[in-house]
Image (cartoon, rainbow, N blue to C red):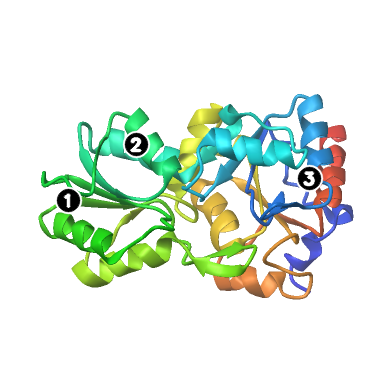
Amino acid sequence: MSEWKRTIGVGNRPSHLRFPRALLFDLDGTLYRGKQRIPGADRLIRSLQERGVPCWFVTNNSSRTPDEVSDHLLAMGIPATPRQVVTSSLAAADYAQRRHPGASAYVIGETGLHQALAEAGIRVLPDGEEAAASLVVVGIDRNFTYGKLAIAVRHMLNGAAYLLTNPDKLLPSDGGLQPGAGTLGAALTAATGIEPAVIGKPSAILMDFALERAGLLPEEVWVIGDNPYTDIAAARAAGCASVLTLTGLCTAEDWEQQCRGAQAMPDAVCVDLDELDIMLRTTESDQ
């Protein structure tokens, strides 16, 4: 049995884990699946907030605004405010503002991405405008067309920088898997040969942005997520401790294999959110 197998379950909490000053939660697969709340998510977040433990919600989803994300959580009984929500769109807008100040951007994406860029002072070009874009930003776009692809490719071949909100090629939905932002981004790379600056998990850019928003250092937080390839890998890239919950992608039988495949081992593994709550309470009482 490997050292990682021994971390599963609260009775074997790794001794190096110190109680965090804040928690960065993944959303889909960790606190909910689509419109269905994962058991214990409401109790866990409510308990943490009542005990004064800050919770931040960090998502690769670029389509929704922070208000829409918090509304989605509240509808499932999970307490959240827009200020606690950190999306890949917000991080992409911050990255664009810092690296490409005053840029004009051609955007393939939905409301959350358009709004975040506009609020960051990035001029978003309409599809029909002939002006050259200095930036192409791509997120999930369920109204994606060949025409949008052609416009983006033209801007990129004319020298526009290329940002991708997140690399997820497939997304879970109520009707099964559907193409994600990574699939749309792959089409642009295939056409131009240009690789994007990737903002969302497993990149550290989104995590670093969330840490800055929280005003904390990497060693002061735990990242909680269900996906080794995104959540746990991003925590590792940012230097944060991580806890894998078996509420989404992984099972008790395959989590270790999945983590090794992702080259991202968590600091601890919890079967569900009730077990995570117990581990947090135990860690808190020990300090």
Which dot marks residue 41? 3
Question: What residue sits 51% from the left and 43% below the top?
Answer: 64
| Mark 3 neighbour class, 10 Å CA radius: few under 14, some 14 to 19, many 20 or more | many
On the image, the x and y values in percent for residue 28 come to: 64, 53
Q: Residue at x 54, y 46 (%)?
A: 239
Q: Is residue 156 above or below residue 85?
A: below
The relative height of residue 176 versus residue 94 in the rendered view (above or below) is below
Q: Which residue is mark 1?
A: 160
Element class at badge 3: helix
**Residue 146: quadrant of the picture:** bottom left
Of residues 167 and 208, which is closer to you in this image?
167
Q: Is residue 51 visible?
A: no
Which of 67 and 241 lies nearest the eye of the viewer? 67
Q: Report whether 24 appears left or right of 200.
A: right
For the residues carrying marks 2 and 1, which lies nearer the camera in this image? 2
Residue 58: % across, % down: 57, 43
Mark 1 is on which residue type?
Ala
Gap in Å between the C-alphas at discs 1 and 3? Answer: 42 Å
Q: Say which residue appears at 72% left-offset and 75% top-offset.
A: 254
If you read the primary sequence from the N terminus, does the residue marked by circle 1 or circle 3 appear first?
3
Point out which mark residue 27 bears: none
Earlier along the polypeptide chain: callout 2 or callout 1?
Answer: 2
Tag 2: Cα neighbours inside 10 Å, few (<14), some, or many (≥20)?
many
Q: Are marks 2 and 3 in contact (CB under 8 Å)?
A: no
- Going by the numbered disc 3, the residue's amino acid type is Ala
Query: Which dot, 2 or 3, sits closer to the camera?
Result: 2
Residue found at x 78% / y 45%: 41
The residue indicated by pointer 2 is 117
Mark toward the start of the polypeptide (2 vs 3): 3
Instruction: Work out which quarter of the rendered image holds the C terminus and state it.
Output: top right
